[in-house]
Amino acid sequence: MINENDILDMTCLTRAQIAAIAEHEHIDAVSAAEMGEYLMHIHHGPQKVQAMICEDIADALHKADLPRARSLYVALKSFVAEHPEALRGNG
């Protein structure tokens, strides 16, 4: 039987990146993994994931939640390193 860990491991995203999507969209991790995987395979989808993480960083900074902002920044940095297409045409 497939469990939650199997589903999360089947995506091209890290657990931190999935968690950022889940936080942004207010959904559970499995739904976020499914959404993230879908977005990573559509036109401008990687840019949408990158924007979600950036919006969450801005929100954390606005709330003066520096530990959360740092954690999200690490997720963003790894996302951009693994998926440079997220930066192309973003604007």
Image (spheres, rainbow, N blue to C red):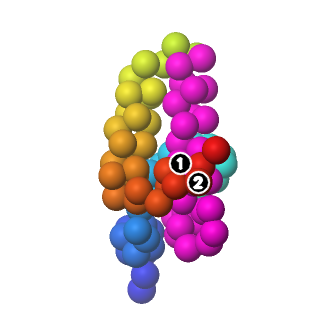
The quarter in which the C terminus is drawn is top right
User: Which mark, by number, is residue 50?
Assistant: 1
Residue annotated with mark 2:
89
Q: Is residue 45 visible?
A: yes
Q: Residue at x 49, y 19 (%)?
A: 65
Dot 1 surroundings within 10 Å: few (below 14), some, or many (20 or more)?
Answer: many
Residue located 59% across and 49% down the image: 90
Residue, x 43% and y 36% (percent of image)?
A: 72
Which is nearer the eye, 66 or 28? 66
Quarter residue 84 falls in: bottom left
In the image as oriented, which residue stretches furthest toward the front? 89
69 relative to 10, above or below:
above
Provide the residue span drawn in magenta.
33-62
Helix, strand or loop status at disc 1: helix
User: Which of the two discs, 2 and 1, sits closer to the camera?
Assistant: 2
Amino acid identity at mark 1: Gln
Figure label count:
2
Relative horizontal placement of residue 73, taking residue 24 as reference (left or right): left
